[in-house]
Image (cartoon, grey):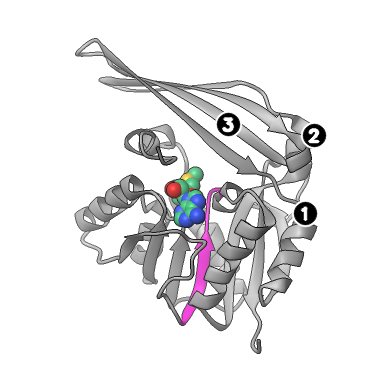
């Protein structure tokens, strides 16, 4: 069973408090600072399309790719509902696609941490590289290793109620420190309070935490010039308090 297959119907509800518009404000400001204020943008690991649609609303010419057919189906339905024509396609972002001449490529909400080793991260970077025009900008985020090691992984419970639905998600994690990965075992109880039904979904997400020095070395090998790594939604350096970090890189003008 592919990751996000059973999880997809509940994804947007689980993250309903995530402020996608504010995140796009932030990312767009960094792209703009890097000289890309508009143009063609590819979202790798676009999920249900929430960032991609925000970018499209702001005038970007957007395309999106995601491994999960279920997530892509939701992205397509959402774009159609918003009256936006966004080519969303199901595909592996670790395989170079047909997208070319983009001004910007983004990969948001830990997609890079779903790539569990150097080889897969490099493959993701090569896809971004092929899609960008020379000088184009790549923005992506990931689990920051310093914070994961400092904070440790623990069992977390999240509950969300949107009548008639109630979701309870238990995330129990197993840390494989030698491989710098974490298996997050999600158990989701999806309750319909009107019908008194309850469904259980189990999914394991295998995550790799990264350190900026290794991310930046892989970027260089893939033809990028990294321009900085920071704590998520800030200009500060990655730090132990912030689980998320992002890196910005520019496709080298010459190969
Ligand atoms: C936490 S979700 C983030 C989705 C979306 N970017 C968002 O912010 O809501 C991670 C996404 O990465 C996608 N993903 C992971 N590995 C991928 C790959 N190799 N190719 C394409 N998508 C991938 C998953 O299918 C999932 O939709």
- On whether ligand 1 comes within 8 Å of the CB at mark 2, the answer is no
Q: Report, in whole angstroms, how far the alpha carbon at label 3 lies from the one at label 2.
A: 17 Å
Residue found 66% across the figure and 82% down from its top = 252
Q: Report, in whole angstroms, how far the alpha carbon at label 2 lies from the one at label 1.
A: 16 Å
Q: Position of residue 118 (x, y in %)?
A: 68, 57
Nearer to us in this view, 51 or 219 = 219
Does residue 209 appear in this view?
A: yes
Contact between marks 2 and 1 (CB within 8 A): the answer is no
Identify the element where label 3 is drawn: strand
- Dot label at residue 237: 1
The residue segment tinted magenta is 101-110
Q: Which residue is mark 2?
A: 150
Q: Which residue is mark 3?
A: 184
Q: Position of residue 90 (x, y in %)?
A: 35, 57
- Quarter where residue 137 is shown: bottom right
In this view, 125 is above or below 114:
below
Q: Residues within 10 Å of mark 3 (few under 14, many from 20)?
A: many
Identify the element where label 1 is drawn: loop
Q: Position of residue 239 (x, y in %)?
A: 78, 45
Labels 2 and 1: the sequence-earlier one = 2
Does residue 58 appear in this view?
A: no
Nearest to viewer (mark 3 / mark 2):
3
Which SS does the magenta portion mostly show? strand
Residue found 50% across the figure and 59% down from its top = 25
Quadrant for the C terminus in the image: bottom right
Question: Does 143 sit left or right of 85 as displayed?
Answer: right
């Amino acid at each position: 069973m592919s990751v996000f297959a059973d999880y997809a119907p509940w994804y947007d509800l689980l993250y309903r408090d995530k402020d996608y518009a504010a995140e796009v404000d932030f990312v767009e400001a960094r792209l703009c600072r890097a000289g890309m204020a508009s143009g063609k943008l590819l979202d790798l690991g676009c999920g249900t399309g929430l960032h991609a649609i925000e970018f499209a609303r702001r005038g970007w010419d957007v395309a999106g790719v995601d491994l999960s057919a279920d997530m892509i189906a939701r992205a397509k339905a959402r774009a159609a509902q918003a009256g936006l024509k966004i080519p969303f396609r199901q595909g592996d972002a670790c395989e170079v696609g047909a997208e070319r001449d983009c001004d910007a490529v983004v990969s948001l909400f830990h997609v890079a941490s779903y790539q569990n080793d150097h080889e897969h991260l490099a493959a993701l970077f090569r896809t971004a590289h092929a899609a960008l025009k020379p000088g184009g900008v790549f923005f992506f985020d990931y689990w920051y290793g310093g914070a994961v090691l400092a904070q440790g992984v623990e069992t977390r419970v999240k509950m969300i109620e949107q009548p008639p639905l109630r979701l309870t998600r238990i995330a129990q994690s197993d840390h494989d420190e030698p491989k710098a990965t974490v298996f997050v075992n999600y158990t989701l109880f999806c309750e319909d309070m009107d019908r008194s039904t309850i469904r259980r979904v189990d999914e394991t997400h295998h995550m790799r935490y990264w350190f900026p020095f290794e991310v930046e070395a892989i970027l260089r090998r893939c033809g990028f010039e990294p321009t900085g790594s920071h704590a998520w939604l800030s200009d500060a350096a990655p730090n132990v308090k912030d689980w998320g970090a992002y890196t910005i890189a520019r496709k080298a003008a010459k190969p």
